[in-house]
Every structure is written in C-alpha cells, then in structure tokens.
Image: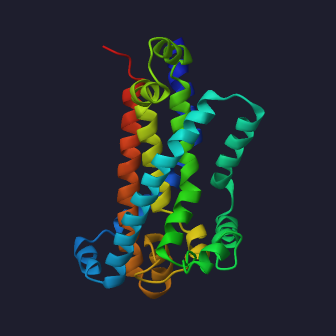
Amino acid sequence: MSGAARERISKGLLFAAGLPLLLFLLIPLATLLGYFSPGEISRQFDEPETSQALLLSVKTSLLSTLIVLLAGTPVAYLISRRRSRGVRLLSVLIDLPTILPPAVAGLTLLLAFGRMGFIGRWFDKLGIEIAFTATAVVLAQIFVSAPYYIKSAAIGMSSVSAEMEQSAALDGATFFQRFRYIVLPLSARSILTGAALCWARALGEFGATILFAGNNPGRTQTMPLAIYIGFERNMEQALTLSLILLALSFSILLAVHALINRNSLPPE
C-alpha cells in the first residue's frame, strides 16, 4: 500500500471518529430549521410580546457592545502592553465571567446594584432604580460579554510591535496619536472580531438577566427570556424567536470567520 493510500485511510478514520460529535452538533440545529414557516414567523411578528422582545434585545445588545468598545479598548491595551503580576491577575479576573455560572453572575450583580446592594443603595437614595429595569439588562449583558471583546482586542494589540510605537514616539508622536494611527489600525480585525463576539454573547444572554433584570414583557424581557416563557405558553413564539437568534448568531459567526480567514491569508 502506497503512502498516499495510507494517508487517505488515516484521514478517513479520523473523520469517522469525529462524525458522531459533528452529527450531535448539527442535527438539533437542522431540526430547528425544519420548523421554519415564513407564514408563522410573519404572524408572530404581529404579536406585541414577540416584537417587543426582539426590539429590546437588539437595542440593549447594541448599546452594551458600544459601551464595551469604548471602555474595554483601554483595558485591552493595558493588558497587551503590561506583563506584571497585577495585570496578569486582572486578565484572569476579566475572563472569570465567561466561566462563571449564569445564576452566580446574576446574583453578584443583584448584590452589587440591587436596591439594597453595595452600590445600588446609593443610587436608590438618589431615586435611581437599576435592578429589574432595562438598565439591568444592559449591565448583565456587559458583565458576561465584555471578556470576549477584551481578550480578542488584547491579542490583536499585543501583535503590534512596541518598537514601532517607540519609533513614532521618537518622531514626536503623542501617546494618543500612536494609539489612533498605529495600534488601532493594525489591530482592527481583532477589535472587530471581538466586537462581533461580544454582541453575539450579549444578544443571547439569559441567566444573569433573569435574576438581575427579571422577565417583564415590554420592559426587561429579551428574546432568550421570551423563548423560555414561550416554551410553556406559546411554542410558536419560542420557535420564531429561536430561529431569529439562530440566524443572527450564524450571521455574526460567519462574519467573524470571514475576518479571521482574510487575516490569515498570505498577501498576494
């Protein structure tokens, strides 16, 4: 048997070993698509709870992503340029919400920003309510999605040569000029990838939201929460919102992979 034949057999066996897991991941998604009905989706859009959940999810997830972009970019740069123990510990703490159980995330937010919480009590004295409002939805989304952006942006910024920044500094460029004209453009793909992942995670946030913001239709009920309630009360609504989330998530991941593949292609 030739070496090429042995290699083909080895690759076939490798694919066969991974096929059960591949089918396990794809069959549920294909099953959901099997319930696709344009007429039913159109009818569900006329239902107030469906349109309200969709609109609230899109608005809050976009707002939370924008906030993470503005506040998370400096944090990502700090992590990418510092190698001290303190910064390494900060990096671990930032990653913590990605593995934290959703119920724990929601409880910690409630203890911090609830009416009698560590920070929330001061807002309450000013007449500002945070928990169980749309603000709580945004905060929950930021808490669970920010690490995805910060980690991706930090990886991109760390690939920018520090010597290039130092050369620009010797030529008289200020820190903000170096950051704007060198760091941001050269790490743009990582920043966009992180922003897309951040938005996708915020869009699908459930556990922390239901504990911290509640499930009030038209006020704090996002698409994942409406799906949860629809599973018991209105299966058509749950299926419609699930299909919408699936389509949005697929589109986001497709764009992310396109960016990554474009970045990995060698220049012509």
Name above or below for residue 58 compared with residue 192: below
Q: Quadrant of the C terminus?
A: top left
Where does residue 134 sit, x and y in percent of width and height? 47, 73
- 39 and 157: which one is in front? 157
Left/right of residue 41 with respect to residue 223 in the rendered view: left
- 165 and 150: which one is in front? 165
Name above or below for residue 235 compared with residue 224: below
- Looking at this view, name the residue that lies furthest to the right: 85
Q: Quadrant of the N terminus?
A: top right
Name above or below for residue 119 compared with residue 170: below
Q: Is residue 16 visible?
A: no
The residue depicted at 48 percent of the width and 62 percent of the height is 204
Among the 4 quarters of the image, the one containing residue 88: top right
Q: Is residue 60 visible?
A: yes
Q: How is the image coloured?
A: rainbow
Left/right of residue 177 with respect to residue 210 in the rendered view: left
Name above or below for residue 212 compared with residue 183: below
The residue depicted at 64 percent of the width and 65 percent of the height is 102
Where does residue 108 sit, x and y in percent of width and height? 69, 67
Where does residue 128 sit, x and y in percent of width and height? 54, 77
Where does residue 256 sit, x and y in percent of width and height? 41, 41
Among the 4 quarters of the image, the one containing residue 235: bottom left
- 70 and 5: which one is in front? 70
Number of marks in the image? 0
